[in-house]
Amino acid sequence: MEVETTSPEETEAIAAGLAARLRPGDVVTVSGELGAGKTTFVRGAARALGVTAPVTSPTFTIGNRYRGTVDVSHLDLYRFEGVSAAEWGDLEPYFEGAVCFVEWPEAGVGVLPPARAHVRLRHIDSGRAISIDDADPGV
Ligand code: ADP
Ligand code: MG
């Protein structure tokens, strides 16, 4: 599906809709240029999954892991060109037992577990267009 939002709050609400269908072990890639709203989307999803801690961009760390009604991980691979076996060793714990959102997933192609859903955000005149491909939308 593709929707348009005109505020961060609307983007967070769309994310909450996806979050309601997710469970631990699910991986969601979140793509789009800088400022497209990737972190805003993850924040909305994390809130909906019961995370009360501030959800901020992990650009200067590999990732963050939060406790909510389920655990939620938020990875940002912006600074990666690829993911080596050693780096995967650092990343793997974020995926275990958590719903895991991955910003800039391109570097992890072929290494990350298969994604349950792909989210793509882009700037449009009046706000953002958000497309969600959910491999398992019926659940
Ligand atoms: P990214 O992680 O893709 O770099 P962020 O979520 O950090 O993007 O930043 C997006 C910025 O755009 C935020 O300052 C947010 O408030 C703003 N913004 C404005 N309109 C929207 C919208 N419709 N959806 C998401 N973010 C929006
Ligand atoms: Mg971001």
Image (cartoon, rainbow, N blue to C red):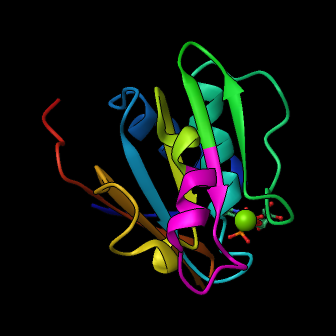
Q: Is residue 13 left or right of residue 37?
A: left
In the displayed orientation, state which residue is furthest to the left. Answer: 138
Q: In which quarter of the image is the C terminus?
A: top left
The residue under the point 46% across, 72% down is 108
Q: Magenta includes 102? A: no
Q: Quadrant of residue 77?
A: bottom right
Q: Where is residue 51 in the image (x, y as percent from the top left)?
A: 69, 23
Q: Is residue 45 left or right of residue 58?
A: left
Q: Position of residue 4 (x, y in %)?
A: 48, 66
Magenta stretch bounds: 74-91
Q: In this view, does 88 lie to the left or right of 112?
A: right
Q: Position of residue 37 (x, y in %)?
A: 66, 65
Q: In which quarter of the image is the N terminus?
A: bottom left
Q: In this view, does 21 lie to the left or right of 42?
A: left
Q: Is residue 13 visible?
A: no
**In the foreground, 32 or 126:** 32
The residue under the point 70% across, 29% down is 66
